[in-house]
């Protein structure tokens, strides 16, 4: 508990110091660094209420700083800066409707309130606080820096069997042994994240961002740092032994090869050659990948069972909702999945199978908030996707490149939501909501930074014209 208190005090002190000596906007990179790095085990239980995590402490402090120092934009700028706000309000409102019909009312209400505090408020503060594209870059660089630190912890975990989370009190969550999940996390790197798959989710987002900043690097030191970060993240991603993040990164690489600028394609080619070299020099790596693929197609293996489990889970979730028209609409209530104790018959063995783990974010959302809740979340992701797509197609080069990176991040994260419960908890969820906020604010910031110089030039031309008229007259 002492360690947690020390971390919280340091986080609060640094946030307040940066905001008061510089600006609230200047504190955002450190804030997202904390969101990504600090494990969920860093929490102080408040009996009868909720756990006060370090992330929540940081968010509450940031809200107080925003109310004290934040500058409110004009009505038009607020509308442009928050294109997702109405969908977020609908998701929040529908969560409350689902809560009113929940069999575990208290759990559902806490889930809705925690989502509002952890993610919706985070989105709002960031969209209102970011005023320039340089801050967007600094925030994304902070993500990379936090992931590099996580990767260093991952290196100790892989070679020495020591995990930094061991310093914190034990927290039971949905991936804890006996609480769900078919694959053991033993021997798989997860650093400060709750599980290896979630760590892999974060790394699959971080690697493309590092490639993007590599195209902006000016000095040898910057390039060396970014290449080190990329290699560390690749190594840790492999050590997570998580198929979903592997495939998500491959999907991101394909999109980058098709649409990114030539320099990123060149870097991808270099990485591909390095990967082939590793597979040749270390044939054990290739053997591991082949065995993983073979086990996925073997229903008798743990990985094969995990793969089939997701299809069975979808089938049983649809059946459970189909028994009641109301449940089809609003589900069983936020946070209710683990109280439902869904069961199904394994078609291979004929044995009754207990669905303790919801290994799909989309299925979890569907079960807990119904098909309407699922459609609202999908609409949110699609809206952010099209905002980035519009920015990529309409903004001038090279400023549109970051819109492509946001778009790819959203595609990769949505893909990973199919096979893991990565919505509404874990550090990667904070990363997603920061990306949602930045992706919606960035196009507006680019346009505003282009308009201001044009207005200055126009004013200078007008002033010179007036001066010339005065001289002539």
Image: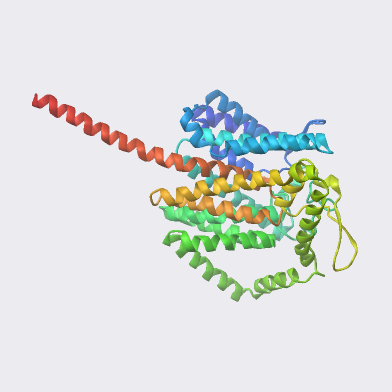
Q: Residue 60 in the image: state x and y as whole percent.
A: 64, 30
Residue shown at 45% from the left, 65% from the top? 266
Residue shown at 52% from the left, 54% from the top? 210
Q: Quadrant of the C terminus?
A: top left
Q: Residue 225 in the image: state x and y as whole percent.
A: 51, 54
Q: Residue furthest front?
A: 325
Of residues 119 and 11, the one drawn nearer to the viewer in this rendering = 119
Q: Residue furthest right?
A: 351
Q: Residue 204 in the image: state x and y as whole percent.
A: 60, 56
Residue 29 visible within the image: yes
Q: Residue 54 in the image: state x and y as whole percent.
A: 68, 37
Of residues 142 and 87, the one drawn nearer to the viewer in this rendering = 87
Horizontal side of residue 419 vs 85, given as left or right: right
Horizontal side of residue 20 vs 44, given as left or right: left
Residue 2 visible within the image: no
Which corner quadrant of the image does residue 58 belong to?
A: top right
User: What coloring was used for the rendering?
Assistant: rainbow
The answer to whether residue 224 is above or below residue 447 is below
The answer to whether residue 108 is above or below residue 360 is above
Residue shown at 50% from the left, 40% from the top? 441
The answer to whether residue 217 is above or below residue 305 is above
Horizontal side of residue 74 vs 159, given as left or right: left
Of residues 379 and 269, the one drawn nearer to the viewer in this rendering = 379
Q: Quadrant of the N terminus?
A: top right
Which corner quadrant of the image does residue 352 belong to?
A: bottom right
């Amino acid at each position: 508990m002492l360690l947690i208190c020390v971390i919280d005090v340091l986080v609060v002190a640094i946030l307040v110091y940066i905001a008061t000596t510089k600006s609230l906007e200047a504190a955002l990179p450190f804030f997202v660094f904390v969101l990504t790095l600090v494990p969920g085990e860093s929490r102080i239980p408040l009996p009868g209420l909720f756990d006060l995590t370090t992330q929540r402490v940081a968010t509450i402090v940031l809200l107080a700083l925003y109310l004290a120092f934040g500058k409110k934009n004009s009505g038009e700028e607020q509308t442009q800066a928050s294109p997702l706000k109405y969908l977020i309000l609908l998701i929040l409102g529908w969560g409350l409707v689902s809560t009113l019909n929940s069999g575990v009312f208290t759990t559902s209400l806490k889930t809705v309130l925690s989502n509002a505090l952890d993610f919706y408020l985070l989105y709002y503060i960031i969209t209102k606080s970011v005023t320039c594209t340089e801050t967007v870059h600094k925030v994304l660089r902070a993500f990379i820096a936090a992931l590099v630190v996580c990767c260093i912890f991952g290196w100790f975990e892989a070679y020495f069997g020591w995990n930094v989370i061991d310093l914190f009190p034990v927290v039971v969550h949905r991936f804890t042994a006996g609480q769900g999940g078919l694959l053991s996390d033993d021997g798989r790197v997860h650093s400060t994240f709750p599980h290896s798959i979630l760590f892999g989710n974060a790394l699959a987002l971080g690697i493309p961002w590092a490639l993007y900043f590599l195209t902006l690097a000016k000095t040898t030191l910057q390039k060396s740092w970014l290449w080190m970060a990329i290699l560390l993240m690749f190594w840790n991603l492999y050590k997570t032994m998580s198929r979903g993040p592997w495939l998500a990164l491959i999907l991101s690489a394909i999109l980058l090869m098709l649409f990114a600028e030539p320099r990123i394609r060149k870097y991808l080619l270099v990485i591909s050659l390095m990967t082939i070299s590793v597979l040749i020099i270390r044939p054990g790596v290739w053997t591991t990948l082949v065995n993983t693929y073979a086990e996925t197609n073997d229903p008798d293996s743990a990985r094969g069972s995990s793969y089939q489990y997701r299809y069975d889970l979808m089938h049983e979730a649809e059946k459970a909702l189909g028994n009641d028209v109301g449940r089809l609409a609003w589900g069983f209530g936020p946070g209710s999945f683990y109280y439902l104790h869904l069961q199904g018959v394994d078609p291979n063995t004929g044995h009754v199978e207990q669905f303790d783990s919801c290994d799909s974010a989309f299925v979890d959302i569907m079960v807990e908030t119904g098909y309407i809740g699922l459609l609202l979340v999908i609409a949110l992701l699609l809206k952010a996707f099209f905002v980035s797509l519009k920015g990529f197609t309409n903004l001038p080069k090279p400023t549109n490149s970051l819109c492509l990176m946001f778009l790819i991040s959203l595609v990769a994260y949505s893909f990973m939501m199919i096979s893991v419960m990565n919505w509404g908890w874990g550090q990667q969820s904070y990363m997603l909501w920061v990306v949602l906020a930045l992706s919606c604010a960035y196009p507006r910031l680019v346009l505003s930074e282009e308009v201001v110089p044009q207005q200055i030039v126009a004013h200078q031309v007008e002033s010179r014209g007036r001066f010339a008229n005065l001289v002539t007259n």
